[in-house]
Amino acid sequence: MMKQNKILLMLGCIGLPLSTYADISVPVDSTSPFYEDSAQFNDVASTSEAGWGWSSAAFCDPYDTGCDTTIAPPADTPPATPKRITVSRVAGSPTIKLNWAAASPGIGSNFRYEVYQQLKNGGNSRIYYGTSRAINYNAGSNTTAKYQVKACNSAGCSALSESSYFAINTSYNNGGANTMPLESFGLNAAISLSKSSTAANVHTLTETDTALSVLGNGFDAIKGEVFGNTCWSALGADKLSSVQNVNEQKYSFRQVDSYESLATSLDLKRSGGGSLSFGGFSIGGSGSSSLYSETSKVTESSVIVASFVDQRKKFQAKQAYELGMASNYTNLLTAGQKLEFRKACGDKFIDTVTTGRKMLFTIRVESVSSSYSEIKNKTLELKASLDQYSADGNFSSSEKSTLEQEFRGYTFEIIGTQTGGSAPSNLLRLNSITELMTVLNNFADSANDDLVAIASTERDYPIPSSMSGSHFSVFTNYPVYRDILTAWGRLDSQVEQRCWMLNSDKVGFDVVGRIAEAMGMTFFQGNVSQENLCSATKDMIDRGINYCANQGEWSNCKLPTASACIDSINQGQCMERPELLSFKQFALAEARLDLARGGCAIGPCKKSASIQQCFATSNTVPDYSRNKVISSSYVPTSIPGLVVTVDRAWQVNYVRNSISNASGKYCLGSSAEVYGKGGWGSGGRYEANNQMFGFKLIENIGYSL
């Protein structure tokens, strides 16, 4: 052994760091069989194929002339199958967005993805060829199709990965019953939202004309919308009985933890929930229903519905006998043509109209390091503060500052609409409570001359004097369809509870991929993931809702639990797929890693430690949407599914965090090393709390419809 090496070993034995003597060079023996000259790897012949053809002289005896001194390139292989493809749709639009997972490219040239549209009972056509993993595609109208993707190269193609079938931009038969949301009447342009106080509404009718355009009109008690015409003989101002000056402005804040209470708070009069944000659908499409559709995690953490209502006048219609039903509509009833009457006049008529302005917001408190119960409690605190600060009709700068301090470390999902907005594009998204307070103040202080119909009450049509019998022996028995629609709405909200974490539009495509893979496959008409089940179920629910909401589709309106209810697109009875969706119960595995090392005589002196904490059961998977490091000092690498709060850290050599599956259970792991300085210098420390949030998958939990 050479002298320098002996010195290094002796120094190492007494604890002195070898790096201190880095200037002591160790001679390299180029004759050693373990010596490799880096030039052998850098000087690759220009004629070699894809880097292959390197010399293997290190493995050959120089006197063995039969030794093969080249390495043959491996055979070309086709790519792996992309694991998943997702389809995102927007109600009323032919454009869909397709995303698919990356595939291992295999060995070969001309790597690409090929995407196909397979029509239900129709042809298969390639719609994309290239290297992107996301496209927008115009699927047309009334299209029923599934989408497939495969990866290819010069060696061939993988197997197909495919979605469920979807009904895209479907038209439903409303039976001739044309309706609109109440606040759409009297507007010739959508009201615009702004964070500044300079935004102006666009409105041309007078306040009285706006009210008269609605007063006495028919009302669809299922959709909660208003017909464009009246069936009374009295027209215009002759319909009006009285006008009451209300002149009242009011803030209100309500905490809700169910979609039914959310609908009530948003004053949605339609029956049933309408499809929620997972599918991106809603009945009608008023500002309120769009807001309802976009608000997520209502049942998990609760939300606050914030409203500012400026009521100006209340217009009262005359009594029915004074209005006088037009004879052609009375004749429809006496002839037993109930559906024809409903098509023209609706189920009820508008009895009162209140004009004014209204702004609605939903507020969801978010914290990656808090449980849903903790977030719900914090949401209650926020509601109490907003109630207190709005009591004087305004929000001061000091109140805004106080709220900022109280909720430091929390984030917010705040979505709003001003009455009159008619499309999701009119939704306003804010990032902070102080922004919300500013918007509400600006709206309250803005001009109130651009008024619309913001509220109404309805009354049953009277039975014509020439007829007798119960109300529904004369008029359409709409409650039958209303109650079925309500059941579909409840199913929709409960499916949303089981599926929101599998919505790529909400939590991200890659996050959904990790969660879906952790959940595994369910055997149903082949191996189907929970993500795929959610997509197919939501598509079916959307159709079920529209069958019941549209008069011309009532023959298809069936309870989801009825044996006659069949998923006509993806097959099977309507409840088969929902019942395979596991209920997701909140779970948390949490552990601290606290590590300290003082200074020492001869340093650096190191100390390491590690911890592991697993979920209690094997059917619990990580919530990969929670992914954050909270630290004002040392910042370890962020790990999907792990929330790390670093309390104190200095003189840290490394921190290694992980999530792994050990013996069938998902576990968080954390290891760290700190060091103290020599000469009895300062010590090192690392203190952090590690949280792995998750979902416990519980099977065979039914639905309450």
Image (cartoon, rainbow, N blue to C red):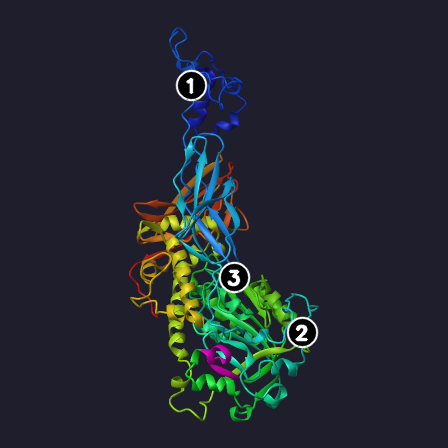
Mark 3 crowdedness (10 Å alpha carbons): few <14, some 14-19, many ≥20: few
- The image position of residue 167, as x and y in percent, is 44, 58
Q: Which residue is mark 1?
A: 71
Amino acid type at circle 1 is Ile
Q: Nearer the viewer, residue 509 or 567?
A: 567
Q: Nearer the viewer, residue 105 or 270?
A: 270
Looking at the image, residue 259 sits to the left or right of residue 213; the answer is left
- The image position of residue 445, as x and y in percent, is 68, 75
- Mark 1 lies on a secondary structure that is loop
Q: CA distance from mark 1 to mark 3?
A: 59 Å
Q: Which residues are magenta?
A: 340-350
Q: CA distance from mark 2 to mark 3?
A: 26 Å
Q: Which residue is mark 2?
A: 203
Report the residue at 40% width, 78% height from top: 479
- Mark 2 lies on a secondary structure that is loop
Going from N to C along the chain, the mark reached first, 1 or 3, is 1
Mark 2 crowdedness (10 Å alpha carbons): few <14, some 14-19, many ≥20: some
Q: Looking at the rendering, in which quadrant would you find the C terminus?
A: bottom left
Report the residue at 41% width, 62% height from top: 496
Q: Which residue is mark 3?
A: 92
Looking at the image, residue 21 sits to the left or right of residue 490; the answer is right
- Mark 3 lies on a secondary structure that is loop
